[in-house]
Image: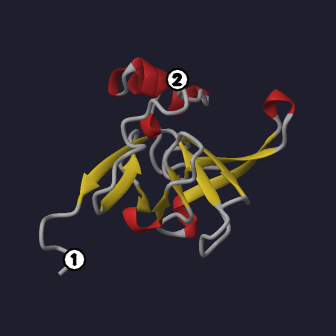
């Protein structure tokens, strides 16, 4: 896939801290229950920490009990790229930012009780959060 945001490895290393680089550019996974956005409950927008592309609205976030921020859908289907992932002896669906190709996490069809039935299990390190301005939803 051709991405709108193309940077060299050196440019990504300059922009991201070591942990973000490992997740976004090398498909690492942060430890469960450690992400700073796991317990974020304010209204707002979750974007790619690598390129700033809008990915998830806070209204689609739910507590899945898995240890990572979970969402039941992206802001637009074209905001994310879904790729079959057969690493680690499993078959999963990897989720990448469609704008820069950054690894975000995986999506699973076990979001029981959600409108879509999906659970986008995302790494906090791959996301940035912008809270809604006070009174914006009124």
Image vertical order of residue 35 relative to residue 55, above or below: above
| Residue lying at 60% horizontally and 70% vertically, measured from the top left | 114
| Residue lying at 62% horizontally and 49% vertically, measured from the top left | 95
| Residue lying at 61% horizontally and 31% vertically, measured from the top left | 27
Q: Nearer the viewer, residue 67 or 96?
A: 67
Q: Secondary structure at mark 2?
A: helix
Mark 1, residues whose alpha carbon is within 10 Å: few (<14), some, or many (≥20)?
few
**Residue 88: % across, % down:** 81, 28
| Residue lying at 45% horizontally and 29% vertically, measured from the top left | 34
User: Can you name the residue that lies furthest to the bottom here?
Assistant: 138
**Residue 30: % across, % down:** 53, 28
Q: Determine which residue is flagged by label 1.
A: 137
Q: Is residue 102 left or right of residue 19?
A: right
**Residue 117: % across, % down:** 68, 68
Q: Determine which residue is flagged by label 2.
A: 22
Tag shown at residue 107: none
Q: Secondary structure at mark 1?
A: loop
**Residue 8: % across, % down:** 47, 27
Q: Nearer the viewer, residue 38 or 94?
A: 38
Q: Is residue 90 left or right of residue 135?
A: right
> How many angstroms separate mark 1 from mark 2 (CA)?
35 Å
Q: Earlier in the sequence, mark 1 or mark 2?
A: 2
Q: Is residue 90 left or right of residue 14?
A: right
Q: Nearer the viewer, residue 48 or 105?
A: 105
The image quadrant that residue 17 belongs to is: top left
Image vertical order of residue 135 relative to residue 84, above or below: below
């Amino acid at each position: 896939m051709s991405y709108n945001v193309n940077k060299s490895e050196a440019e990504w290393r300059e922009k991201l801290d070591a942990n973000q680089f490992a997740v976004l550019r090398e498909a690492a996974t942060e430890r469960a229950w450690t992400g700073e956005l796991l317990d974020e409950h304010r209204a707002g927008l979750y974007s790619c920490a690598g390129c700033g592309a809008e990915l998830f609205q806070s209204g689609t976030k739910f507590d899945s009990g898995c240890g990572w921020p979970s969402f039941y859908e992206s802001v637009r289907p074209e905001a994310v790229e879904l790729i079959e992932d057969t690493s680690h002896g499993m078959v999963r669906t990897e989720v990448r930012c469609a704008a820069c190709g950054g690894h975000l996490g995986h999506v699973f069809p076990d979001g029981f009780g959600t409108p879509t039935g999906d659970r986008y299990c995302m790494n906090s390190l791959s996301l940035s959060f912008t809270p809604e301005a006070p009174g914006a939803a009124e």
